[in-house]
Image (tube, rainbow, N blue to C red):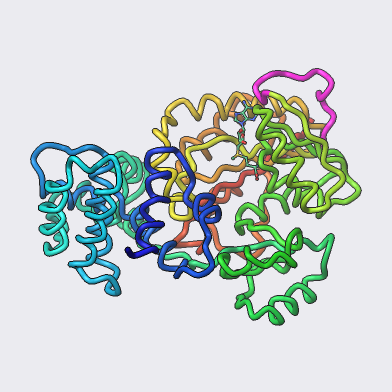
Amino acid sequence: MNKELNLAYKVLNNVYFKGAYASIELNKSYISNLNFNLVTKITYGVIDDDVKLDYFVKQFYKKAPKKEVTLIFKLAAYLSQNINSIPKFAVVNELVEIAKHSKLKPYVSFINAVLKKIVNAEFVLPDTKDKRLYLSIKYSKPLWFIDLMLKNFSDDFVVEFFEAELTNLTHIRVNTLKIKYSDFVSKLKELDIDYTTSTLDDALFVEYSKIVREESLNGLYTPQGIPSMIVSRNVVGNTILDACSAPGGKAVYIATLNPNSKVIACDYYEHRAQLINDYSSRMSVENVTTKVLDATNFVPEFEGKFDCVLLDVPCSGLGVIDKKPDLLINNDLDFLSLPDLQLKILENNSKYVKSGGSIVYSTCTILPTENEDIITKFLQKHPNFRLDTVDTFGVLCDDKGGLKTFYPHISKTEGFFIGKLVRND
Ligand SMILES: C[S@@+](CC[C@H](N)C(=O)[O-])C[C@H]1O[C@@H](n2cnc3c(N)ncnc32)[C@H](O)[C@@H]1O
């Protein structure tokens, strides 16, 4: 049996049918004597190509089979089109074996027959005349996502957005509370871990699967994207509130950059707030206090108390889909109600800002309805706030009157939005 294929199938089963996250599942399943790069490639390949593979395999049956059978078909299609090291006959044999040893045993002859067709067929894109379907299959994104993009952006922009290829390397922040940047780089060299520099002077790009297995580096770095770090760098002051904080990536960086300030980090969910505590301890940060709070509820003792309030609000996450493709598989992504929640959070937390203080509003989506529209609606009702400039530390962004959107094809980062408001009165 092909051990890599078996493990990838197990991981995919947990992602598709048990709501697991691919990265966590892969980490848990690590086995050193396997070709783990291949397991990772197959797992993410199938997840990334889910929409495309679904379209392709549907051509080979009339009645939709059990979803577990469809996953076997998708896996076969992915392998035969992308992984030359496993011959087509072996793909069929291995997957039939997997089916035989699972609850899919009664369907083995059907699976065998369809698999043989799948591995020998060629993938053909739909006609460009059907623009929605063509884009959906070509970029393997659900139709609703394509519709949203076409509604908000020009056709050319949408194509450029989906064509953008970000590096496979992971952006990490060096924990300068514990190690000097130059010493961290020397450690990477000693450990023979390749890296490239970042536009940010306390960060690097590394091969994550290598660095994560180096226990000697624990606590000395953390994965954190460029826009996420830029959000934190725009938050300044002695008293700081992070109202939607878990797992604490931005709060902990803010606390690192401002060691003399007091950072209050809140989240609606208790178990998520605990993640902030764990993360603060791991990164040796002592100036973060965690609270479980609903950001839509007014807290009288916070009124007018903060130099800066960070609102990294719950959002559709469509800017980070390429880095977390399983978001599209695990979630029903019901985000029509998000703008109301986002505006409510902004309205409520604006009361906590001192005169002359600021609000940093951010999302990891590129949809205007969750970004500039929220800020515009807020400013119409609150003339005591004005827009301030967001510093993007040299990263090229779309700039609408100071509101910055990071698009993968422009910024070479994941999609993100940052707006900054200052209280005048
Ligand atoms: C985008 S995430 C925050 C990520 C975080 N800032 C970081 O950098 O690690 C949004 C967070 O808002 C929390 N959340 C959702 N609804 C909330 C509410 N009504 N009040 C407070 N937090 C909420 C979610 O649990 C989630 O942890």
Q: Does the magenta stretch include residue 362?
A: no
Q: Say if 370 sits above or below 279 in the image.
A: above
Q: Does the magenta stretch include residue 299?
A: yes
Q: Residue at x 47, y 42 (%)?
A: 20
Between 117 and 387, the one lying in front of the other is 117
Q: In this view, does 214 lie to the left or right of 258?
A: left
Q: Picture coordinates of residue 328 (x, y %)?
A: 39, 43
Q: Residue at x 34, y 65 (%)?
A: 2
Q: Say if 391 sits above or below 13 in the image.
A: below
Q: Which residue is drawn at 39% across and 33% down?
A: 332
**Where does ligand 1 appear, by image quarter?**
top right
Q: Residue at x 49, y 66 (%)?
A: 168
Q: Picture coordinates of residue 353 (x, y %)?
A: 78, 31
Q: Picture coordinates of residue 333 (x, y %)?
A: 42, 34
- The quadrant of the rendering that contains the C terminus is top right
Q: Main secondary structure of the magenta part?
A: loop
Q: In this view, does 181 lie to the left or right of 34?
A: right
Q: Say if 269 sits above or below 415 in the image.
A: above
Looking at the rendering, the stretch of residues picked out in magenta corresponds to: 294-307
Between 46 and 335, the one lying in front of the other is 46
Q: Picture coordinates of residue 121 (x, y %)?
A: 11, 62
- The quadrant of the rendering that contains the N terminus is bottom left
Q: Is residue 285 left or right of residue 204?
A: right
